[in-house]
Image (cartoon, coloured by chain):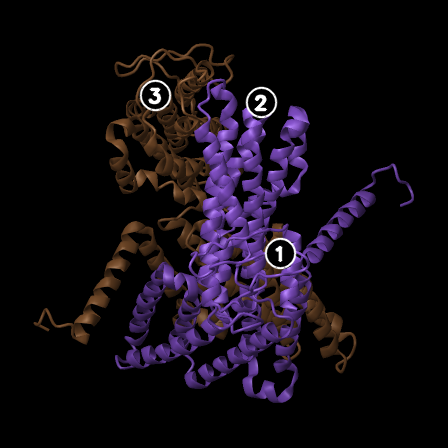
Chain colours: A purple, B brown
Amino acid sequence: MGIIACKSPSSKMRALILNFATRIHKLGKDDPRRIVHSFKVALAITLVSMVYYVRPFYNGLGENGVWAILSVVVVFEYTAGATLCKSMNRGLATFLAGALGVGAKFLASLFGTKVEPIVLGCLVFLLVAAATFSRFIPQIKRRYDYGVMIFILTFSLVAVSGYRVDKIIELAHQRLSTILIGGATCIVISVCVYPVWAGEDLHNLIVSNLEKLASFLEGFGGEISKLPLDGDSVDSSSVPEKSFLTAYKSVLNSKAMEESLANFAWWEPGHGKFRFCHPWKQYLKIGVVTRQCGYHIEALSGYVDANFQASSSEYTKRVQEPCTNISSEAGKALKELAHSLKSFSYPSKCTIHLQTCKGAVEEVNTMLKASMVGELDVLEIIPIVTLASILIEIVKCVETIFVIIEELSEQAHFKKLKVGHHGGAVASVSDEEEDKGFVKVVIHKITSESQEIDQGNRG
Amino acid sequence: MGIIACKSPSSKMRALILNFATRIHKLGKDDPRRIVHSFKVALAITLVSMVYYVRPFYNGLGENGVWAILSVVVVFEYTAGATLCKSMNRGLATFLAGALGVGAKFLASLFGTKVEPIVLGCLVFLLVAAATFSRFIPQIKRRYDYGVMIFILTFSLVAVSGYRVDKIIELAHQRLSTILIGGATCIVISVCVYPVWAGEDLHNLIVSNLEKLASFLEGFGGEISKLPLDGDSVDSSSVPEKSFLTAYKSVLNSKAMEESLANFAWWEPGHGKFRFCHPWKQYLKIGVVTRQCGYHIEALSGYVDANFQASSSEYTKRVQEPCTNISSEAGKALKELAHSLKSFSYPSKCTIHLQTCKGAVEEVNTMLKASMVGELDVLEIIPIVTLASILIEIVKCVETIFVIIEELSEQAHFKKLKVGHHGGAVASVSDEEEDKGFVKVVIHKITSESQEIDQGNRG
């Protein structure tokens, strides 16, 4: 144990355990709600297992108490929405299938004892096949997949076991009440004890995706302006180290996550700033355009790594300046949009940056139009021209996101902030109603400042 | 019923039912395996419910027969891999948790009857919390998530119910054997009766994704060459009608699907041309680069809709030709790659198209270098220049896909085809070993022809 240099099996074992412990620690640190969730599940199961320990419960429910434990284990999910979805599905499906099962049993008994099992078998076969097929229908798969599974399960159990067990009504009553005990325990614990809301997670995911794109664009603006100074070698080696240049990659594959969260959010009651019928669909729309924007950024990052090293001509430098502007202003606009989502306020400040953006886009266009390139090598101007055109596409995406968030803020009744005189910064809004979304602003300020003001307004 | 014009509730109802029936019909027609799957599940449940009808089974297992039905319902999944994954997880977890549960019961009984429930409660609480937390560890979540759930379930049931039921060993024995009956039924039916292999689905998904990109590039090549002839208005209106220009979109969001299929494929035994340890990871790599390529294509389609209408200058026309070449040759290369994957043969023919592609890329580069544009408007050449640079990126992606499929064909022992004299088309391969992946070819042929030859070679 004291020998350090020797790699004995015990020290290897210790390293392995240490490594494992570090990873577990990181997992808990990344999202402490995971630890809380683990204890919530343990609490629910311990509570439900009381039906075994407490004499009156046990006498009433008997061995059917297992169904309560079973319900908790399979129904308790990470988010409150998923738990609600599963327990509602389970409760309803059990009730429906139980009733149908009793009906099927009654129907089969009309045929006499000999034919009864055959009729029951056929009924089970047909209903199970139909129900299994219905799980492929997208609308059912999205919201009631688990319910259909439980329906199949309960119907088969009731129809089949009904053949032997005569006290079928009592059994159904016991099963339903144990499932209700289990489901209710899950719902109460997952909604009341440090709840994890799928809706809130979706909201935060969308906000953080917007912020990741914003960081890329802001940071990328800085990179463009530095390029001729740093030269070739520094540029290509320094790029991979900057986390903001790779963080956006997770945005590209967030579709599945967003859709499942939106499905679960549909089941959740109002919580925090979210009402019962919060327009979750709008978040999915934002997600689609965000990914679209992410694809353009992906193209952008690809070109820059490869092509930018060769270009430091006068022309490139001239176009570079408005490009830097477009990139960082688009980034700021996105950051503002993320911020307005986060603070449930109308995205009025974003228009400032969008306006500056559009100004820079026009500047680039004029510059390109004006220059009948007599003195230029086509190969030399390709990178900057490509860059400019991708940036213009990105600005279009940002505008679309702005429009969708504007719609969302109408639907969810976000509070409208008037941009005014604050903390020494002057910003004037003129003809906000007429100017269809774009305000003219005298002085625009850096993002950190405007965030400060927003926080002030909220306080 | 006979009145047609009147929209009575009954005719509305009929329209609704008709609409529903059409959709169901389409669902089954799109993938007839869904119908087969439904009947497979129904068959499995009907078979398993025999334990109730057949006297000797019932006498042996009694009411525990429910567990067999339950196992079938929750374990039977669409693909054989998923079914195997779930049933193995279920079997192993039940065994392990049952043993641990008996151990926990024994440990608790040492403390005397009064303290026993408290000790058991604490044990259940701690183990459930730890197991629930372990479900957040990515490696466990990927392959053993269901197993951990069943572990929690069985452990709680055994530990808790053990407090009342003395015949715990007999119970465990019965539960295990019913689960084995259910699991074995599922495995046998899902593997033997028209099996749906996750591995095969993954293989087909990757192939079809490559084909979608190939169709886009081939079709897009045709679009470029047609552009100056058709003029502005025809171009923008004809684009949305062509399905090959939008089919690639599904490639962008296939990540989640590919990963889940690869996970399930890991559990599957050898089937068809796939061995037991088929290099499924390689497919995921192909998927990553395919999506990368898809992002570039997304950028391509965006630019073409918007920018191409203005450009029909002499210069554009000159660059257009090699671009058309790059696009359709890259498409053909991808189609060849898809084809070689499909036919489990070495992608030797793809190199022909890749070589032509590289030739065209060099042509474009020379053309751009040569033209010190004295007479050109920068704005006018932007679209074609952007187009060219995106196409060059796409060629890089295609090359990477080629390398990965080459690796795959080594690992999975694909058969090597010699390209030779066939059907009137002459193709000569020189120095295949030395030339590191690229063959020089005298005459290259259109894709449909080379596919014909491949099929000839395979026969």
Mark 3 burial class by Cα count in 10 Å: few <14, some 14-19, many 20+: some
Amino acid type, callout 2: Ala
Q: Which mark is residue B75?
A: none
Q: Chain of mark 2?
A: A
Residue sticking out furthest to the bottom: A56
Q: CA distance from mark 3 to mark 2?
A: 26 Å
Q: CA distance from mark 1 to mark 2?
A: 42 Å
The residue tagged 3 is B321
Q: CA distance from mark 3 to mark 1?
A: 55 Å
Q: Which mark is residue A426?
A: 1
Q: Residue at x 62, y 34 (%)?
A: A225
Residue B410 seen: no
Q: Chain of mark 1?
A: A
Amino acid type, callout 1: Val
Residue B450: give x, y in percent of width and height.
32, 22
The residue tagged 2 is A310
Residue sticking out furthest to the left: B2
Q: Secondary structure at mark 2?
A: helix
